[in-house]
Amino acid sequence: MPQTTKISLEDLKQFVADHNLPDGKKLGEIIDFSNRKPLLIAGELANPCRLADMGAPDLPIIPIRLENICRTWADSLDPREITPGIHHVTIARSPGWWEISYITLIELKDMKKLVNWLDGNTPNTWAPKRLNEGIIRLENDLGLSPPSMEDISWDGEIESVNTQIPNPNGPIIDLASVIVPIHTRSGCYNSRGRIIRCAHIMQNDFHENYFRRGSSFKWNQLLDVI
């Protein structure tokens, strides 16, 4: 792990390129990272089997920690392949929160392919954005647990995390360099004024016990973007 508080895009690419593979080669000998950009991947985009189905190129899957932002369920169903459908994952503001997620390094043409796959038959449902809030940092503790449901309080308007964010294990990645796919048609699901975090409620539980059409936050209520 780089022993710095922040990491530039070029240093991030070098850090990943220097990763040693089981056969002794470095990742940079197999993948050319020179034209690649960081993309936040969550939900289906963080599933290696799904990436293979999409015909994605070779991609590093890099553990990161989200702080003050969280993964939550998009307020729509993707009916492809499965009935009733897949709830994809979008990002929302959540002060005091932390959780493990992933980024990859990908060329822009392939990034468009992944975001277009999220769109499916409804173009412009998903948009690549750059966040203007939250923290994304490298993380090496995959066992790091997010706050529990009992750690979240709600006063009818604002949710608060009642525990401290753990000390960092890795440097902060420049937010302006990270592309984040955001569900821009209807944002995320609105559960009586609250968001539902993917870390707390799994997809099947969400669909069977929470989801109902017509209750959503608009995406620009959830995040500030550049």
Image (cartoon, grey):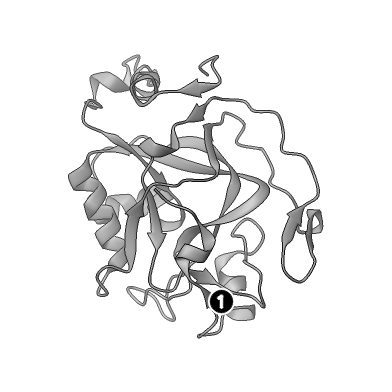
Task: Pick whichever, 190 or 31, lies toward us.
Answer: 190
How far across and how far down the image is residue 87, in percent?
46, 69
| Residue depicted at x 60% and y 36% | 142
SS assignment at label 1: helix
Whether residue 193 sits left or right of residue 43 in the image: it is right
Q: Looking at the picture, how far across and down is residue 155, in whole percent?
A: 80, 67
Q: Is residue 163 visible?
A: yes
Residue 73 seen in render: no
Check disc 1 and give the amino acid type.
His
In this view, 220 is above or below 82: above
Residue 95 at x, y = what percent?
66, 50
Q: Is residue 86 above or below residue 224?
A: below
Identity of the residue drawn at 18% across and 46% down: 109
Where in the figure is residue 32, as x and y percent of width and height?
21, 26
Q: Quadrant of residue 141?
A: top right
Q: Which residue is mark 1?
A: 207
Location of residue 158 with respect to 167 vertically, above or below: below
Please tell me in which quadrant of the rendered image residue 81 appears: bottom left
Numbered circles on residues, count: 1
Q: Which residue is at a point 52% across and 65% down the rendered structure image?
A: 221
Mark 1: few/some/many CA within 10 Å (<14, 14-19, 20+):
some
Q: Is residue 6 left or right of residue 130?
A: right
